[in-house]
Amino acid sequence: MITGRTVVAGVAGRPVGHSLSPILHNAWLAAAGIDAVYVAFPLEGDGFEAFAHALRGGVVRGLNVTLPFKARALAVADQASDLARRSGAANVLTFEPDGRILAHNTDGIGLLRAFQRQAPAWDAAAGSVAVLGAGGAARGAVAALLGAGTPRVWVVNRTLARAEAIAQALGPQVQALPLGRAGEALADATAVINATSAGLAGQGGLPVSLDATPAGCVIMDMVYQPLDTAFLRQARALGRSTVDGLEMLIGQAVPAYEAFFGAPPPAGVDVRALALAALAGDRG
Ligand code: NAP
């Protein structure tokens, strides 16, 4: 029931109608019995900054921020976590009672949580990781991997200059390669992460062969619409274990919920099943 004290949080993006975040957060809120609601804010036009400033003081407790506003979310904040700064983007803003806006980045945390859940034997610190792509998601992944102790991260991208910019920003453990030389990064990788938008419904797949990966290499795809991408199917055909983008989405929502509502999500809610049902509904 919505009351006079109902706390509001939500997700801002363009478009945002297909976001799974309201489903995850509202299921947790209902199970926890918290007087709060999580809604989608579709921001048409160019008013992201005006919207964020209007929420100062806590009219809305916090926001997840999705495409295309993650870099602007970092810029609008008064203070940012180390991970958000190193990622060059924020996917979570919180609105403090004193008027400040704080920026966080939980995407990289979500990535690592997804590995913990679906490939629990994988160790981030055990060897090099290849990240395919050099957009915001890739940079956040590289920042999180370095934070988890990965000794070397290859950033492999169609546009080499974007990969080089990430290497420049995040330090000597990060090395850039063009997509055509992906094999060099794959040969000794403990994990390969697709952080490109290739594979998204309606787009072509990623022209990268996983043949060169070692047998124990874990293959992860951030794309979750569709959940079963050609990239993951290629990995399974080679006998590699896989991690999917939906688990990353759930993984980033866990610390976001805690930032908004002050406690971890309650145990025992099968939010993955709810999200899968919503994805199936979207297809139908
Ligand atoms: P972005 O900033 O637009 O970057 C897109 C990247 O994909 C660029 O590196 C681009 O290469 C590359 N790319 C696009 N089409 C390609 C193709 N056909 N062949 C090769 N490379 C291609 O996007 P982003 O924000 O980083 O997001 C990347 C993906 O991660 C999206 O699919 C997004 O949905 C997903 N994501 C998932 C989660 C999750 O929780 N599961 C969270 C964040 C993001 P160029 O630089 O050469 O253009």
Image (cartoon, grey):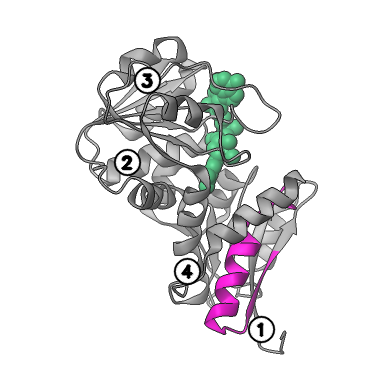
Tell me, yes or no, whether the highlighted magenta stretch contains residue 163: no
Q: Earlier in the sequence, mark 4 or mark 1?
A: 1
Mark found first going from the N terminus, 3 or 2: 2
Which quadrant does ligand 1 occupy?
Answer: top right
Name which residue lies at 36% across and 48% down.
112
Q: Residue 273 lies in what quarter of the image? A: bottom right
Tell me the magenta residue range.
13-39
- Residue hosting label 1: 6
Q: Quadrant of the N terminus?
A: bottom right
Q: Is mark 4 within 8 Å of ligand 1?
A: no
Mark 2 vs ligand 1: CB under 8 Å? no
| Residue under label 2 | 145
Where's residue 203, x and y in %? 67, 26
Query: Which mark is first along the chain, 2 or 1?
Result: 1
Judging depth in this view, the residue of 34 and 72 nearest the camera is 34
Marks 1/2: CA distance?
37 Å
Residue with the mark numbered 3: 176
Q: Which residue is mark 4?
A: 259
